[in-house]
Image (cartoon, coloured by chain):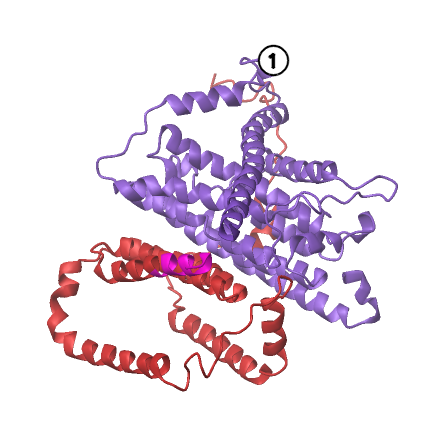
Chain colours: A purple, B red
C-alpha cells in the first residue's frame, strides 16, 4: 500500500508539473504570435504605413492566418542536406528558448521551478540556443546558410561574455542566484531597482540581448540584403516557422530577464500601488517595444563593427563597472549598490 | 531501484554511447555534436551529485562556448577521414599504452580499499536551501585563495601568449579607424559652393 501511495504522489507531481508547463507555454506562444502582429503594426506606424489590416478586425487574425499558412506548407529537405541534422536544427533552436522559461518568476509564487541557481541556469540554457543556428546552417549544405551560421556563432559567443559580465553585476548587488530573491532585493520603490546603480550594465545587457537574439540592427545571421536569409534560407513551412517562434520566444525571454534583473520584476514602482503581475507585463512589454523601436530605427551594423562593439566596448565597460560596484560596496555608500 | 538510480543509469548509458560515437563517427561534425551530448549528459550526472554549480558551468563553458568554437573550426575544415585513419596501426601501441595506464589509475582509485564506501561513506544529502555555489566561492576565496589566484595568473599569461603568437598584422591590408570616422566633421568632407543656377545674360551665348 505504501508504494502505491508513493506512485500516486509521483504521478500527481508529474501531472501537476505538466499542467504548469502548459499554462506557461500556451500564453507564451500566443504572446509570440501577437508580438509578430505588434511588430508589423508598430513598425508600420513608425514608417507611416498601415500594417496588416485585412484578416479579422484591424488585422488581429493575421498571426493566426500566417501560422496556418506555414502549417499547410510542405517542408522541403534539400537533396544535398544532412537530413537528420537538418531536422534537428529547428528543434535545438526552440528547445532552449522554451526551457529557459522554467525559472522565470512572474510573481513571488508564480514560477514553474524555483531553484537556487536560477540565474546560472538561464545563462547555461540560453548559451545553447546557438546550436540550432549553427547546425541548421551547416546541415543545409548551402553557402548562404553556412555564412549565416558562421556569423551567428562568432557573434553569439562574443556577446554572451558581455551579457554574462552584466549579470555578474546583478549577482553582486543582489547576492543571490535565485531570481525571486533578485527581484525582492529591489523592493521599496522605483529608486531601488538595479537599473540605477547598474545603469551601464543595464545598457550593455539590453544591447547584448538584441545581439543574442539576432535582431536588427545585429541581424547579420539573416542579413536579407547580403546573404538572402542566412541560416534558414533552405527551410520552409513549419520548420521555418519554428525558427521564427524561437527568435520571438527568445526576445520575450530577454525582455523578461531584463524586467526581473534590472526593472524590479512584479514590484510596483510606487509604494501606494500594490505589486502584481501587471507591472511585470508592463515592464516586459516596454522592453519588447524597445526591440521593435530599434528595428525600425537603426540600419544593420557591419560585421566587423559588431565584433568591435562587443569585444572592445562592452566587455571593458562591464569589467570596469564590476570593479566600481565591488569597490563602492566597501565604502559607506555601499547600501546604494544593494 | 530508486528514481535517482534509474536516472543515473539512463544518463550513464547515454554518456557511454555518446563517448563511443565521438571516436567512431565518420563525420567530424557528428563527432563534435556527440561530444556536446556527452558534456550535457555529464552535467546531468553532476547535478545528481548535488554539484549544481559545476554542472551548470560545464554546460555554460564547454557546451555554450568551447564546443561552439570547436564546431566553428571543424565545419570550416575539409577533413579527409580516410587519410586521418591511415596511421591507425602505427599509433596503436602508444595509444594502447596510454589507455592501459589510464585503466590502472582508475582501478587504483575505484577498486582500492582506501577509497571504498566503508572508508568514505556517502555524504548526507544537503537541505534544499543549501547553495553549492556559495560554498564553492567561500572556499575558493578563503582557504584556497593563493592556488586560485595562481591559476588565474597562469590563465592570463596563456591568454596573452595565445594572442601574441597569432597576432600578425599584414602591411598591405587596409584598416578602418572608427575613432577617426566618428570625429569627422561636415566641413572635412563637404564643401558648399555658392553659384548661380543660370548664366549671366550676355555670357555664353555662342554656346547655345
The residue sitting at the bottom extreme is B114
Few, some or many residues within 10 Å of mark 1 (<14, 14–19, 20+): few
Q: Main secondary structure of the magenta part?
A: helix
Q: How many marks?
A: 1
Where, by quadrant of the figure, is residue B37 drawn?
bottom left
The residue sitting at the right extreme is A272
Up-down relation of residue B61 to residue A255 (above or below): below
The x and y percentages for residue A276 are 75, 39
Q: Is residue B9 magenta?
A: yes
- Give the residue pinned by disc 1: A57
- Which residue is pictured at 75% across the width and 57% down the height? A197
Span shown in magenta: B1-12
- Which residue is pictured at 38% across the width and 58% down the height? B11
- Which residue is pictured at 59% across the width and 60% down the height? A165
Closer-to-camera residue (B208/A200): A200
Q: Is residue A202 left or right of residue A163?
A: right
Whether residue A141 is visible to the viewer of this picture, yes or no, is: no
Closer-to-camera residue (A159/A305): A159
The x and y percentages for residue A168 are 63, 61
Whether residue A268 is visible to the viewer of this picture, yes or no, is: yes
Q: Is residue A194 magenta?
A: no
Amino acid at each position: 500500500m505504501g508504494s502505491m501511495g508513493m506512485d500516486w504522489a509521483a504521478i500527481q507531481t508529474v501531472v501537476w508539473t505538466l499542467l504548469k508547463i502548459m499554462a506557461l507555454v500556451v500564453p507564451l506562444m500566443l504572446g509570440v504570435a501577437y508580438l509578430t502582429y505588434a511588430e508589423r503594426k508598430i513598425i508600420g506606424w513608425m514608417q507611416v504605413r498601415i500594417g496588416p489590416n485585412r484578416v479579422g478586425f484591424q488585422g488581429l487574425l493575421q498571426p493566426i492566418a500566417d501560422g496556418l499558412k506555414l502549417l499547410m506548407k510542405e517542408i522541403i529537405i534539400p537533396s544535398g542536406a544532412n537530413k537528420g541534422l537538418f531536422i534537428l536544427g529547428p528543434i535545438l533552436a526552440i528547445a532552449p528558448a522554451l526551457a529557459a522559461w522554467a525559472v522565470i518568476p512572474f510573481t513571488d509564487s508564480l514560477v514553474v521551478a524555483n531553484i537556487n541557481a536560477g540565474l546560472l541556469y538561464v545563462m547555461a540554457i540560453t548559451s545553447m540556443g546557438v546550436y540550432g543556428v549553427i547546425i541548421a546552417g551547416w546541415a543545409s549544405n548551402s553557402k548562404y546558410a553556412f555564412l549565416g551560421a558562421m556569423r551567428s556563432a562568432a557573434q553569439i559567443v562574443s556577446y554572451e561574455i558581455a551579457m554574462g559580465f552584466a549579470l555578474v553585476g546583478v549577482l553582486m548587488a543582489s547576492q543571490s542566484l535565485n531570481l525571486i530573491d533578485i527581484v525582492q532585493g529591489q523592493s521599496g520603490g522605483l529608486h531601488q531597482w538595479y537599473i540605477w546603480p547598474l545603469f551601464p550594465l543595464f545598457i550593455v545587457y539590453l544591447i547584448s540581448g538584441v545581439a543574442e537574439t539576432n535582431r536588427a540592427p545585429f541581424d547579420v545571421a539573416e542579413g536579407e540584403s547580403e546573404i538572402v536569409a542566412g541560416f534558414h534560407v533552405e527551410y520552409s513551412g513549419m520548420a521555418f516557422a519554428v525558427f521564427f517562434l524561437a527568435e520571438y520566444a527568445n526576445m520575450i525571454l530577454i525582455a523578461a530577464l531584463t524586467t526581473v534583473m534590472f526593472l524590479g520584476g512584479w514590484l510596483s514602482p510606487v509604494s501606494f500601488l500594490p505589486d502584481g503581475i501587471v507591472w511585470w507585463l508592463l515592464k516586459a512589454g516596454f522592453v519588447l517595444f524597445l526591440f521593435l523601436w530599434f528595428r525600425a530605427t537603426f540600419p544593420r551594423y557591419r560585421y566587423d563593427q559588431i565584433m568591435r562593439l562587443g569585444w572592445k566596448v562592452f566587455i571593458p565597460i562591464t569589467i570596469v563597472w564590476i570593479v566600481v560596484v565591488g569597490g563602492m560596496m566597501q565604502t559607506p555608500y555601499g547600501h546604494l549598490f544593494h | 531501484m530508486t528514481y535517482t538510480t534509474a536516472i543515473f543509469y539512463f544518463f550513464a548509458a547515454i554518456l557511454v554511447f555518446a563517448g563511443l560515437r565521438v571516436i567512431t563517427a565518420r563525420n567530424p561534425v557528428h563527432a563534435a555534436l556527440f561530444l556536446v551530448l556527452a558534456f550535457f549528459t555529464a552535467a546531468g550526472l553532476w547535478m545528481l551529485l548535488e554539484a549544481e554549480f559545476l554542472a551548470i558551468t560545464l554546460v555554460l563553458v564547454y557546451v555554450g562556448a568551447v564546443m561552439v568554437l570547436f564546431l566553428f573550426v571543424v565545419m570550416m575544415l575539409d577533413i579527409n577521414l580516410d587519410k586521418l585513419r591511415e596511421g591507425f596501426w602505427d599509433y596503436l601501441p602508444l595509444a594502447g599504452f596510454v589507455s592501459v595506464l589510464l585503466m590502472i589509475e582508475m582501478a587504483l582509485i575505484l577498486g582500492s580499499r582506501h577509497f571504498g564506501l566503508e572508508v568514505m561513506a556517502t555524504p548526507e544529502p544537503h537541505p534544499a536551501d543549501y547553495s553549492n555555489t556559495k560554498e564553492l566561492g567561500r572556499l575558493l576565496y578563503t582557504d584556497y585563495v593563493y592556488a586560485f589566484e595562481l591559476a588565474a595568473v597562469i590563465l592570463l599569461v596563456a591568454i596573452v601568449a595565445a594572442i601574441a603568437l597569432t597576432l600578425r598584422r599584414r602591411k598591405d591590408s587596409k584598416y578602418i579607424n572608427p575613432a577617426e570616422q566618428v570625429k569627422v566633421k561636415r566641413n572635412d568632407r563637404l564643401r558648399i559652393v555658392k553659384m548661380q543656377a543660370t548664366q549671366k545674360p550676355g555670357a555664353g551665348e555662342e554656346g547655345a
